[in-house]
Amino acid sequence: MAVKQIEYNGLKYELSYEISGQNSGQNILILHGWGANKELMKRAFSRYFDDYNCVYLDLPGFGLSSHLEVALNSRDYANIVSKFSSMLGFEFDAIMGHSFGGKVATLLEPKNLILLSSAGIIHKKRLSVRFKIAIFKLLKRFGFSRFWRFFATKDVNNMSKIMYETLKSVVDEDFSSIFANLNSNSLIFWGISDDATPLSSGKKIASLIKNSKFYPLEGDHFFFLNNAKFISQTISKELK
């Protein structure tokens, strides 16, 4: 494991990363999803990608990278990762991202993009969720934002307020136009039983990205854990 310090918008971020397969000629950056870290991605793919030099990165606020001092959006994350890539001193032949990491990878506009059940397509929230958001916004106007945890889902009970603000920011980003204007060669892998980013999202992303191939696979949002061999072999074959 290694650490690089990045300065962005006047703040310093320590980014934890790991490189495997350093003798290979091609480079791939692998980004985890929200709430995860590089260890999950290593667990899936460390036995594969023999023909790639893999860089596993903890995004700011996750894993062993530094905590956030201010809330970020996906573009901020992409800018920070871009600075990290420049500091490493080599270009990536491909960038792969799962869920939220897929949005960050997309914004980096790599020559070859690999998406694993990527976020970026907005689905209408349930009425109960929309009601809680409306009440929270009203209370915030009157200075009662300290009650934010009451309005958060159970999944964020242990999350800091800054991370919760970051989550709210990135969850509501619609990437439809970004996908539609993307020029990257794209391979899109998706869990058929994914209920976090449903299969319909994957199909829509595949229809929006001009040069893309879509691979629905058995599994849920973390389908890649049981399909890493097929995914890595397909990437190696398609990107030769």
Image (cartoon, rainbow, N blue to C red):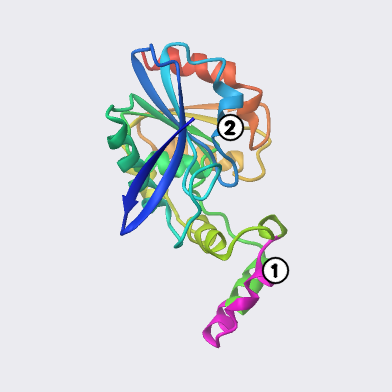
Q: Residue 87: image x %, image y %? A: 29, 36
For this view, does 172 lie left or right of residue 208? right
- The amino acid pointed to by label 2 is Glu
Please identify the residue farthest to the bottom as the structure is shown: 142
- The amino acid pointed to by label 1 is Ser
- The tag earlier along the polypeptide, 2 or 1, is 2
Magenta region includes residue 151: yes
Q: Is residue 132 above or below residue 204?
A: below
Query: Does the rendering let one see residue 217?
Result: no
Q: Residue 32: image x %, image y %? A: 53, 38
Q: Residue 98: image x %, image y %? A: 53, 37
CA gap between label 2 and label 1 equals: 35 Å
Q: Residue at x 58, y 59 (%)?
A: 124
Local secondary structure at mark 1: helix
Magenta region includes residue 222: no
Q: In the image, which disc is placed on residue 128?
A: 1
Magenta-drawn stretch, dominant element (helix, strand or loop): helix
Q: Nearer the viewer, mark 2 or mark 1?
A: 2
Q: Residues within 10 Å of mark 2 (few under 14, many from 20)?
A: some
Q: Which residue is mark 2?
A: 39
The segment highlighted magenta reads 137-153
For this view, does 151 lie left or right of residue 53? right
Quarter of the image holding residue 210? top left
Local secondary structure at mark 2: helix
Q: Residue at x 45, y 54 (%)?
A: 174
Query: Does the rendering let one see residue 75?
Result: yes
Q: Residue at x 67, y 44 (%)?
A: 195
